[in-house]
Amino acid sequence: MRPPTENAHVVMIGPGTGVAPFRSMIKQHAGEWDKHLFFGCRNKNKDFYFGEEFSQMVGRNELTFYPAFSRDRIGRKVNYVQDLLVKEDILFNRMVYDNLPLYIYVCGRAGAMPKDVRSAVKNVLLHAGVFDTEEFLQYMIENGYYQTETY
């Protein structure tokens, strides 16, 4: 993944071990960018990788952090990173129309997650007023603004 070389809004989506490269990116670029990390795992008490470290970064205003714990649910609703993205559509609205470029990075296990995240991103872009979300995402991909690393 290629990080921005300019001041930018940076959205990192890393469920499970997919968060590891973002931890490095955040630490290496402390004080740079408007950083938002969407992290997902099954249980807060079992696999909340780097949770304490990310909480400290939030306390120092280095990061905005959105955790989802899919098995620690209240009631029947399962909470995944793509659900958090949809809940934060106002954030994306601000970032799309701000003067800073928007970078979106997705890292983690291949399978349904990358497709589900892409669908959620398209949804929030549509709510932000981007009418042709597929064309917009294709532009982002071709120009390095939307990058994925899945395995």
Image (spheres, rainbow, N blue to C red):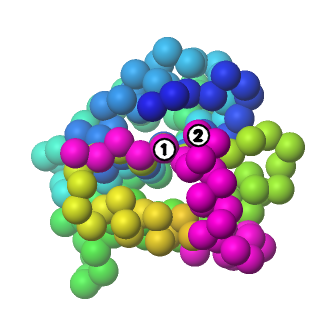
Q: Residue at x 25, y 84 (%)?
A: 76
* Quadrant where the image shows the N terminus: top left
Q: Are marks 1 and 2 in contact (CB under 8 Å)?
A: yes
Quadrant assignment, res 61: top right
115 and 36: which is toward the camera: 115
Seen as rendered, the residue at the extreme left is 46
Using the rendered image of the protein, determine whether residue 100 is visible from the camera's viewpoint: yes
Percent of width and height locating residue 82: 42, 65
Q: Which mark is residue 129?
A: none
Residue pushed farthest front? Answer: 142
Q: Give the percent coordinates (x, y) of residue 136.
A: 67, 62
The image position of residue 16, as x and y in percent, is 24, 46
Badge 1 crowding class, 10 Å Cα cut-off, few under 14, some 14 to 19, many 20 or more, is some
Asked whether, in this view, residue 56 is left or right of residue 92, the answer is: left
Q: Secondary structure at mark 2?
A: loop
What kind of residue is marked 1?
Gln
Amino acid bearing label 2 = Gly
Secondary structure at badge 1 equals strand
Where residue 23 sits, quadrant-wise, is top left
Left or right position of 41 against 26: left
Q: On residue 147, which mark appears?
A: 1
Question: Disc 1 versus disc 2: distance between alpha carbons?
Answer: 6 Å
Query: Where's residue 83, x and y in %?
Result: 43, 70
The boundaries of the magenta stretch are: 123-151
Residue underneath mark 2: 144
Q: Is residue 139 above or below residue 86?
A: above
Q: Nearer the viewer, residue 47 or 11?
A: 11
Q: Residue at x 57, y 18 (%)?
A: 30
Residue at 72%, 25% (x, y): give it: 6
Q: If the image is split into quadrants, where does the C terminus sit?
A: top left
Taking depth in this image into account, of 1 and 47 the one nearest to the observer is 1
Q: Is residue 103 visible?
A: no
